[in-house]
Image (spheres, rainbow, N blue to C red):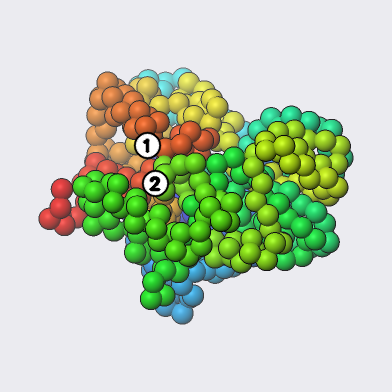
């Protein structure tokens, strides 16, 4: 079986490796000239190509974010600067000889069903060699889309923004604080990217404001006794306790968060519960707020020519820069719309967030289209392991009706559990989701727990 893998980032490399494991003939198409995806830092800003900040350090510990069959080197630090992540991905590619399967600087123009799709499940891929400009078509038996979910900028419609005369930059395009010295800056959005940018800019700017509509729970990378917070949080016993004693666990977690710094006193008290929205992992926010170089503001009501009016009627004038840390929109512009489509950041029905159930043949897998509340690398790897076994016929997916029931129940649960945001349309709990995929794939270990 000939499989096309689109993208050579974290999920694309895992897809190639899993194809090798299952004896599938894979070809990976990567539009840049190297592996790594968003972890490959570049000063150059390219539309549709997400990149970490120059200073980005992981908020997941190395033991939790590695591939299952390739541990991080022991000498690597607990939390990795992005250069270490790129080194690790290079080591992974070298260990399993993955580069020979990758065609670099190749852009995918379209992925369409072949004329005989109902019988064969084959796809026609139109691709462009970016070096020569040559366009050609190839036929593949299956496709694994590994382009991720952080490529297209999500920009809400802010009243008056077109009239603002200062600089407007999306977090997608932000790299480093150079050039922002002494400026008055507003960062809109208080997710992990927004908080990191705000903290970094507050070291060089004259004043930084961060606007949030809901506030946020903030946790450090390191918790009691110097342990990584992800190692203490993502445990099966915690799942059981949350199920049995949800109110008590919520109370204890909130108490722990406020013991570090009182979220109300620091103007960050959220309007939501601690388990209903993705928290921030950031070590520096309390210090920056305490020093006054960073100030919290409510939602933006409207922009003026040189400032902003907020929902609480306060006004900030003479702003030089607005940073839109408003996240990303899921898009697969090259993919046959009859396979799956995206509307208002909601991906058309995907079974287990991977497989379009309405296809006559299960020969398409969407990898990485999840917002895992935990480490992403193991999740993407497990998605690839399952997908390649489905392609091989070793795992049979349920019938259409069963898949749709599963999808509908998940969407209902998401709406009940999480605050409505554009990223929570594909939110998954790390351990529970990994268990789901492993059970379907027949590789979940028997741990003596249900």
Task: Find residue 183 and report its horizontal and vertical position in percent.
Answer: 82, 57
Task: Find residue 252 and report its horizontal and vertical position in percent.
Answer: 34, 57
The answer to which image quadrant residue 92 occupies is bottom left
Residue at 30% over, 39% down: 390
The reply to whether dot 1 and dot 2 touch (C-beta < 8 Å) is yes
Secondary structure category for the residue under label 1 = helix
Residue at 40% over, 31% down: 415
Which residue is disc 2 drawn over? 275
Which residue is disc 1 drawn over? 417
Viewer-nearest residue: 237 or 6: 237
Q: Quadrant of the N terminus?
A: top left
Seen from this angle, which residue lies furthest bottom?
A: 75
- Above or below, comparing residue 353 to residue 361 in the picture: below
Task: Find residue 417 and report its horizontal and vertical position in percent.
Answer: 37, 37
Secondary structure category for the residue under label 2 = loop
Mark carried by residue 30: none
Residue at 24% over, 29% down: 398
């Amino acid at each position: 079986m000939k499989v096309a893998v689109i993208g050579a980032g974290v999920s694309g490399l895992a897809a190639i490796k899993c194809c090798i494991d299952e004896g599938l003939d894979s070809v990976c198409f990567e539009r840049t000239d190297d592996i790594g995806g968003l972890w490959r830092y570049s000063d150059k800003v390219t539309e549709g190509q997400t990149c970490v900040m120059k200073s980005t350090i992981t908020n997941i510990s190395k033991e939790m974010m590695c591939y299952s069959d390739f541990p991080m080197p022991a000498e690597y630090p607990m939390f990795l600067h992005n250069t270490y992540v790129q080194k690790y991905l290079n080591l992974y590619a070298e260990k399993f000889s993955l580069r020979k399967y990758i065609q670099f600087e190749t852009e995918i123009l379209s992925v369409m069903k072949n004329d005989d799709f109902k019988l064969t499940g084959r796809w026609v891929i139109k691709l462009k060699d970016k070096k020569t400009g040559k366009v050609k078509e190839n036929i593949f038996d299956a496709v694994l889309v590994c382009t991720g979910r952080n490529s297209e900028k999500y920009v809400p419609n802010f009243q008056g923004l077109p009239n603002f005369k200062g600089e407007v930059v999306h977090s997608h395009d932000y790299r480093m604080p150079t050039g922002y010295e002494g400026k008055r800056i507003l960062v809109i959005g208080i997710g992990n990217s927004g908080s990191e940018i705000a903290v970094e800019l507050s070291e060089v700017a004259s004043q930084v404001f961060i606007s949030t509509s809901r506030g946020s729970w903030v946790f450090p990378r390191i918790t009691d006794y110097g342990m990584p917070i992800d190692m203490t949080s993502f445990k099966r016993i915690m799942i059981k306790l949350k199920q049995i004693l949800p109110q008590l666990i919520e109370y204890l977690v909130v108490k722990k968060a406020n013991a570090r710094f009182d979220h109300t006193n620091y103007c960050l008290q959220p309007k939501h519960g601690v388990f209903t929205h993705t928290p921030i992992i950031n070590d520096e926010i309390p210090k920056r707020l305490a020093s006054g170089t960073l100030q919290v503001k409510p939602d933006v009501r409207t922009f003026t020519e040189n400032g902003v009016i907020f929902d609480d009627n306060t006004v900030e004038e003479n702003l030089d820069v607005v940073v839109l840390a408003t996240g990303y929109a899921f898009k697969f512009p090259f993919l046959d719309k009859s396979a799956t489509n995206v509307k208002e950041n909601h991906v058309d029905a995907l079974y287990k967030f991977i497989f379009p159930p309405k296809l006559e043949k299960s020969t398409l897998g969407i990898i990485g289209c999840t917002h895992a509340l935990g480490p992403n690398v193991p999740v993407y790897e497990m998605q690839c392991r399952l997908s390649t076994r489905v392609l091989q016929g070793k795992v049979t997916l349920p019938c259409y009706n069963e898949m749709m029931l599963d999808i509908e129940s998940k969407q209902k649960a998401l709406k009940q559990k999480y605050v409505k945001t554009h990223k929570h349309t594909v939110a998954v709990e790390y351990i529970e989701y990994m268990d789901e995929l492993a059970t379907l794939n027949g590789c979940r270990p028997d741990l003596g727990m249900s």
